[in-house]
Amino acid sequence: MGFPGILKGALLVRARKITDEMAIAAAYSVANFAQKKGITPDYIMPTMSETEVFADEAADVAMTAIANGVARVTPTREEVHAKTLADIKEARAVIDLLMREKHIAAPDPQMLANAVEKAVALVTK
């Protein structure tokens, strides 16, 4: 869950490096998103389909990079959030088109279910 938001936030501010504080900001961002949605035994963290989490995470990481002095450019939080959402929407549209035109196969639902089951088992050990 951390990778896309950390990378996107760092790239949008052209960060010189990824600091520990940026990684911690990403973790808090994901946790806060889940908490706002309501944590239950069946929902402990956002899913990949909840694109808003990545925009929140990228914005929080970008703002932390600016505060840490590692950013080369300083967009606003709203700019980072909007750009991230737009990029996700565009990428997903391309993937949908490629699947619709049969250039790539859709993910196997059973394979995804098995992966989720394994991840949950690891987390709950």
Image: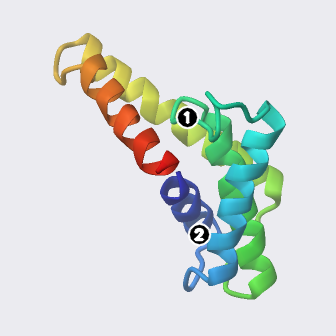
Residue indicated by mark 1: 47
Q: Is residue 24 above or below residue 104?
A: below
Residue 89 placement: quadrant: top right
Q: Is residue 118 above or below residue 78?
A: above
| One can see residue 46 in this view | yes
The spot of residue 40 in percent (x, y) is: 71, 31
Amino acid under label 2? Ala
Residue 52 placement: quadrant: top right
Q: Is residue 56 above or below residue 86?
A: below
**Would you call the spot at circle 2 few (<14 residues within 10 Å), some (14-19), or many (20 or more)?**
many
Q: Earlier in the sequence, mark 2 or mark 1?
A: 2
Quick one: SS at disc 1? loop
Residue indicated by mark 2: 10
The spot of residue 37 in percent (x, y) is: 78, 32
The spot of residue 33 in percent (x, y) is: 75, 43
Residue 100 placement: quadrant: top left
- Comparing labels 2 and 1, the label whose residue is closer to the camera: 1
Left or right: where 48 falls relative to 82: left
Tally of numbered discs: 2
The spot of residue 83 in percent (x, y) is: 65, 47
- Residue in the picture at 73% in, 55% down: 29
- Residue in the picture at 55% in, 34% down: 47
